[in-house]
Structure formats: C-alpha cells, structure tokens
Amino acid sequence: MNEILLWRKIARIILLLAERLDIKPERALSIFYGNDVCTMLHTPRYGLHLMSDAYIVDEIMLELQQKQE
C-alpha cells in the first residue's frame, strides 16, 4: 500500500478512535501504536489495510476489552 495512503488511513483511524473513546487525539495515537492491530495494519499479508476505518477501530476496541479482562 502506498505509504501516503496508509498514513492518511491511520490519521482517520486515530481521529475515529478518539471520538469513540471521547479522548484527545494524542491519547488515541498512543493507544493505537500500543495495539497489535497497528502492527497488523502495517503488515500487508493480513489485509487489514483493505478494511474500513470503522472496522479497524472496532478491532482496536475488541483488543482493548480483551486486555482489560
């Protein structure tokens, strides 16, 4: 995937995550980069870059829930 497109996608995901969690984008950025979904998004073989931004945020939310349990 073109790096510019990936960075734009990540920016949209971070803003959506911040909105969903009602937190500042800076905190959402930290959560995103501390999440396994971030690694998967940067690895083309998972195909996560083909999924919608909302789907990826849902996956991040699921991972956060699993970490809390």
Image: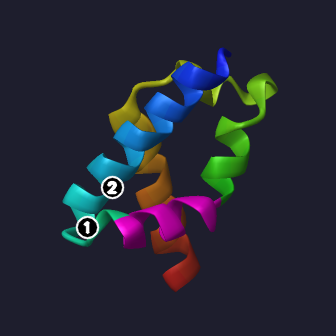
Viewer-proximal residue, 31 or 11?
11
The answer to whether the residue labelled 1 contacts the one labelled 2, judged by CB atoms less than 8 Å apart, is: yes
Please state if 34 lies on the left or on the right of 26 as rendered.
Answer: right
Q: Which residue is mark 2?
A: 17
Looking at the image, residue 39 lies above or below residue 20: above
Please state if 39 lies on the left or on the right of 30 as rendered.
Answer: right
Q: State the image quarter where residue 63 is shown.
A: bottom right
Q: Secondary structure at mark 2?
A: helix
How far is disc 1 from disc 2 in space, using C-alphas? 6 Å
Which numbered marker is on residue 38?
A: none
Viewer-proximal residue, 63 or 6?
6
Q: Which residue is mark 1?
A: 21
- Give the main secondary structure of the magenta stretch: helix
Q: Residue at x 50, y 84 (%)?
A: 68
Residue 24 visible in this rendered orientation of the protein: yes
Q: State the image quarter where residue 1 is shown.
A: top right
Inspect the image, locate mark 2, and give the three-letter code of the amino acid beneath it.
Answer: Leu
**Location of residue 5 in the rendering, given as x and y in whole percent from the top left corner:** 53, 20
Viewer-proximal residue, 69 or 41?
41
Q: Residue at x 65, y 24 (%)?
A: 3
Label 1 Cα neighbours within 10 Å, binned few <14 / some 14-19 / many ≥20: few
**Location of residue 19 in the rendering, given as x and y in whole percent from the top left corner:** 20, 57
Inspect the image, locate mark 1, and give the three-letter code of the amino acid beneath it.
Answer: Leu
- Report the span colored magenta: 26-35
Looking at the image, residue 8 lies above or below residue 15: above
Looking at the image, residue 34 lies above or below residue 68: above
